[in-house]
């Protein structure tokens, strides 16, 4: 048995529970601890049963409730090392980072990772991909230094809310929660993109995604022969993501914006540029192109997620994906669902 429960999806917060018969993990904690606990109870997921929290990347909409929830449940958090480092930097009160400064940090992390990959496999697509991302981010950082944006998808300022901590902490922790270190976690475990690891009876394969974060990842989860995957927050569909998304039974896939709505919409130009870039978010069009050309058609459900509230309409995203699948007559069995920002999706069990 495997189950996926999307608790929230979108630029105001992301979180999904993945369960096998014995193990239960939370991917991202992008809502407040209180809200996450509330949504788990609405969806019938018992927070006390969670074994770990996995983090895709350090953007606010993926980590807002992370430390409070991990401490409350006393469970380990799994990061890549660069993501953990970026998260600690973001939360360290001495460094009130501007978006531009934070991008500089992200760019250095990308450069380091590109060099590490190139040292092992000099001509690999991934090495080239990371070097390209590093150059794009340097460009965005230069623009952001001139024109500070209020991008709703990016997390420049300190997201820690002490009031939230008090309300969510069990009573015995109230005193200790007076001046907590926002980066304190009960336990931290590192994983590496491309290297499979296990939590309980779930095998997890993290894969690199192109996005303006230190070391962002998607995940494939496998237990008892069932495979579920999450791929949101990616600027485009590079070869390594296409090959990671083979033989998937339940796929949560980004369908962030409609290109015309984004172009004509309310965001400042610098933000539009970032969303559209190869380290931004996947458009309905790019998602449809993947579904039509590269997708192997194996999923029982495709969940479209991380829909922009300003630059997309659920029916546009659905129509675009269904049309792409409909163009492949063998794929009519695929059911398309939409993940929501405000309410959890009914659990999907296979
Ligand atoms: Zn996001
Ligand atoms: Zn992101």
Image (tube, grey):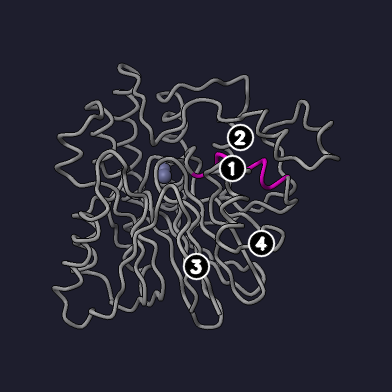
The magenta segment is 62-71
Q: Residue at x 65, y 70 (%)?
A: 23
Find numbered disc 1 in the image and state the secondary structure of the residue it sits on. helix
Which sits earlier in the primary sequence, circle 3 or circle 2?
Answer: 2
Q: How many other residues sit within 10 Å of disc 1, few (<14), some (14-19) or many (≥20)?
A: many
Q: Residue at x 63, y 66 (%)?
A: 24
Give how far across and how far down residue 226 sits, in percent: 49, 79
Ligand 1 quadrant in view: top left
Asked whether disc 1 touches disc 4, contact meaning CB atoms under 8 Å apart, the reply is: no
Give how far across and how far down residue 80 sits, in percent: 56, 50
The residue where tag 2 is placed is 88
Q: Mark 1 vs mark 3: give the one in front.
A: 3
Find the distance from the CA under tag 4 to the CA under tag 2. Answer: 28 Å
Asked whether disc 1 touches disc 2, contact meaning CB atoms under 8 Å apart, the reply is: yes
Find numbered disc 4 in the image and state the secondary structure of the residue it sits on. loop
The residue where tag 1 is placed is 84
Find the distance from the CA under tag 1 to the CA under tag 3. Answer: 29 Å
Query: In which quarter of the view is residue 308 placed?
Result: top left
Find the distance from the CA under tag 1 to the CA under tag 4. Answer: 26 Å
The residue where tag 4 is placed is 46
Which sits earlier in the primary sequence, circle 1 or circle 3?
Answer: 1
**Magenta-drawn stretch contains 69:** yes
Find the distance from the CA under tag 3 to the CA under tag 2. Answer: 32 Å
Which sits earlier in the primary sequence, circle 1 or circle 4?
Answer: 4
Q: Mark 3 vs mark 2: give the one in front.
A: 3
Q: Mark 1 vs mark 4: give the one in front.
A: 4
Residue at the farthest top position: 146
Q: Is mark 1 within 8 Å of ligand 2?
A: no
């Amino acid at each position: 048995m495997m189950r996926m429960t999307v608790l929230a999806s979108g630029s105001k917060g992301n979180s999904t529970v993945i369960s096998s018969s014995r193990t239960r993990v939370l991917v991202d904690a992008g809502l407040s601890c209180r809200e996450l606990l509330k949504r788990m109870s609405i969806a019938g997921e018992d927070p006390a049963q969670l074994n770990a929290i996995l983090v895709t990347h350090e953007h606010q909409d993926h980590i807002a409730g992370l430390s409070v929830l991990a401490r409350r449940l006393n469970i380990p958090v799994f990061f890549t090392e660069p993501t953990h480092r970026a998260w600690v930097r973001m939360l360290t009160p001495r460094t009130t980072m501007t978006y531009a400064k934070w991008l500089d940090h992200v760019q250095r992390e990308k450069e380091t990772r590109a060099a590490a990959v190139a040292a092992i496999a000099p001509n690999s697509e991934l090495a080239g991909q990371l070097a390209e991302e590093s150059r794009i981010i340097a460009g965005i950082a230069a623009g952001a230094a001139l024109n500070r944006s209020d991008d709703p998808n990016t997390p420049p300022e300190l997201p820690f809310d002490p009031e939230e901590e008090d309300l969510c902490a069990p009573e015995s922790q109230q005193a200790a929660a007076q001046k907590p270190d926002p980066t304190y976690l009960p336990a931290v475990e590192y994983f590496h993109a491309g290297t499979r690891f296990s939590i309980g009876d779930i095998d997890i394969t993290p894969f690199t995604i192109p996005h303006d974060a230190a070391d962002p990842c998607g995940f494939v989860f496998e237990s008892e022969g069932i495979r579920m995957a999450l791929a949101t927050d990616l600027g485009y569909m590079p070869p390594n993501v296409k090959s990671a998304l083979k033989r998937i039974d339940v796929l949560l896939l980004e369908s962030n914006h409609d290109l015309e709505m984004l172009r004509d919409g309310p965001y400042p130009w610098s933000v539009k540029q970032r969303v559209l870039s190869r380290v931004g978010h996947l458009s309905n069009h790019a998602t449809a192109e993947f579904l039509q050309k590269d997708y192997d058609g194996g999923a029982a459900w495709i969940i479209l997620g991380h829909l922009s509230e300003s630059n997309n309409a659920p029916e546009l995203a659905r129509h675009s994906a269904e049309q792409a699948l409909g163009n492949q007559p063998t794929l009519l069995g695929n059911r398309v669902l939409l993940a929501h920002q405000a309410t959890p999706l009914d659990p999907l069990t296979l």
